Structures are given as C-alpha cells and as structure tokens.
Image: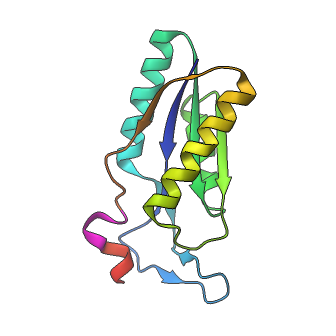
Amino acid sequence: MSVYVCLKQVPNVEGVPSIDPESGFLKADAWYLNPLDAYAMRGALETAAILETDCVAVSFGGPEAGDGLRQALGLGADRAVLALTDLPMPGPGLTAWNLAGAIRADSVEAGTAPSGVFCGRQASDVSGLTVPSR
C-alpha cells in the first residue's frame, strides 16, 4: 500500500506572469508548491507514518513541476512521479486523468494498491481565475 499526494507548482502570483511565445507555457519569475497542496502533503506524510507505508508525490505538468516534486522529496516523500506534458494549459479534466493514470501505473509497478490519495482543495493560481485572465 502507498499513500499518494497530488501536487501542483504554481507561479508567484505577486509577480506578473507572461506566456512564453515559443512554448506557450506560462512564464513566471518564481514557481512554488501550491500552499493547499502543502497541507495535503502534510496529511499524506502523517497518514503514511500511521499506516507504516510509503508516501508518493505525484504531479502533472511542464518542466517546472519537477521542482515541486524535489521539494516534496525534501519534505519526506519516499518517491516522486512526474507525468510530463507538452501542453501549456491541459485543463482540469486532462490533469485529473493523467494524475490517476500516473498513480495507477506507479501502484502496478510497486505491486500494491493505493491506500489513499490526498489532494489540495484548489490551486492558488486559478483561485478566482487570477492567472488565466492575465
């Protein structure tokens, strides 16, 4: 059994993000772990400790998502899984589908079933559609 936590890297909303004209990806002066996902990370780590199992951080996105997974490993996650995409704004449906696929693939590879999946309530970059409207 493994406890999974879904994480998202969000841009610094105090800065002024822009769109990279070559890749179509959002450019920001800094990226950080979504604060509500950090709470989910804490819950996942505590649950994994109680169940005496491993905690796996999962993310879906562009190259900046790897930084959040490295941060999760620093916070205590045992493994990290990145579902990389070249789509600049994949949307919530595609994101959920790919996160579920990454969790499924990792649990099959580990030979266990997920014992729980933790997610943050929402991402700070789409709260009130802050970033898309810019």
Q: Quadrant of the N terminus?
A: top right
116 left or right, relative to 105: left
Task: Identify whether 64 is placed above or below 19.
Answer: above
**Does any portion of residue 69 appear in the rendered image?**
yes
Q: Is residue 127 magenta?
A: yes
Kindly identify the residue that appears in the image at 57 percent across and 74 percent down: 88
Outermost residue toward the left?
A: 128
Dividing the picture into quadrants, the one containing residue 119 is top left
Q: How many marks on residues?
A: 0
Q: Position of residue 45 (x, y in %)?
A: 48, 24
Q: Position of residue 126 (x, y in %)?
A: 34, 66
Dividing the picture into quadrants, the one containing residue 129 is bottom left
- Residue nearest the observer in this picture, 60 or 71: 60
Q: Is residue 120 magenta?
A: no
32 left or right, relative to 2: left
Task: Identify whether 16 is placed above or below 114.
Answer: below
Dividing the picture into quadrants, the one containing residue 60 is bottom right
Q: Position of residue 42 (x, y in %)?
A: 41, 30
Q: Which residues are magenta?
A: 125-129
Q: Looking at the magenta stretch, what is its main secondary structure? A: helix
